[in-house]
Image (tube, rainbow, N blue to C red):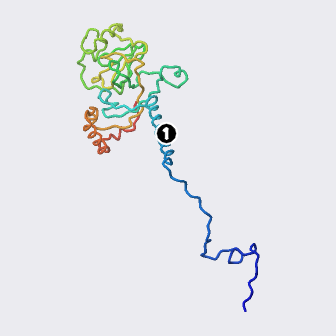
Amino acid sequence: MNSPVENIPADQVPTSPVPGGAMPEGVRPEHKPAEPTAPHQGASSWAPGVIGSLQSLMGTVVIAVFVITFIVQAFQIPSPSMENTLLIGDYLLVNKLCYGGGGIADFFMPYRKVSRGDIIVFHYPVNPMQHFVKRVVGVPGDHLRLVNKKVYVNGTALTEPYVHFSRPSDDMFRDNFPRTDVLSGPTPEWWVQMRKLVEDGELIVPEDSYFVMGDNRDNSYDSRYWGFVPKANIIGRPLVIYWSVQGGEMDAAAPVSIGDKLYHFAYLLTHVFQITRWNRTLTLVK
């Protein structure tokens, strides 16, 4: 005889087949809470990511343009006029802020004046589209002359351990400057201006102008031949040689066609370790 089934109220029915409420090992609840479904991936779901990437890219471009415009700029040495301080194939980072911009900020920022002995990068006065790099020999108010290649400023011979000579003293204008009786060498405009600024055989450097020369004195097309560098033409002062490459003569002649440029780039990329002057790379310019 079967035992009668007890009528147990519904609210007293045990919720677990094991006393104490513990589930048997290996058993999982049959009904799990419904998991939230992922939102529908519509066409606009990627838009915020693309916009964010574009904003980051534009921010990077703006910073890069600001740095190149106002702080530092890269230049390449294309000629031997500054040997052995700077060689063909040296790549420079130039500090564009060190001398100030000639505005009211010059009174508040720690800018410095252009000094005798500084190496500067500037717009070539005869053709401002070109960039030259030379060393400052005379500043405003200086009385300057060369006697047998030796530079005298205000009656005192300069000590220039960085100067390099490669030819004998056989050029009257180049080695004994200024010469108002020698027509060869200077541009016509500079010849006229120079004659007005020479007193007692010395050239007087006018206000806001600088007399510059290359360290390779016998092979430098400098202020002796075309005149002063106006202060407004000065771009800045070289900081560091960030890369130096052998065979710079080839590099200095810019490829003209697209094919030449691609070949030039491929050659540099595949021979970077062989052509790099490691002893000059990442060295300060002095």
Q: Is residue 86 above or below residue 201?
A: below
Classify residue 1 by image quadrant. Answer: bottom right
The residue sitting at 44% across, 32% down in the picture is 65
Give the residue type at disc 1. Gln
Residue 105's spot in the image, x, y percent? 53, 22
Residue 33's spot in the image, x, y percent? 62, 64
Classify residue 143 by image quadrant. Answer: top left
Total marks drawn?
A: 1
Q: Is residue 218 above or below residue 177?
A: below
Q: Secondary structure at mark 1?
A: helix
Classify residue 88 by image quadrant. Answer: top left
Q: Quadrant of the C terminus?
A: top left
Viewer-proximal residue among 111 and 179: 111
The residue sitting at 38% across, 11% down in the picture is 204
Is 24 placed left or right of 255 in the picture? Answer: right
Residue 135's spot in the image, x, y percent? 37, 24
The residue sitting at 29% across, 45% down in the picture is 270
Is 105 placed left or right of 258 in the picture? Answer: right
Viewer-proximal residue among 244 and 24: 24
The extreme bottom residue here reads 1
Residue 95's spot in the image, x, y percent? 44, 29
Viewer-proximal residue among 183 and 145: 183
Neighbours of disc 1 within 10 Å: few (<14), some (14-19), many (20+):
few
Q: Which residue is mark 1?
A: 55
Q: Is residue 194 above or below residue 57?
A: above
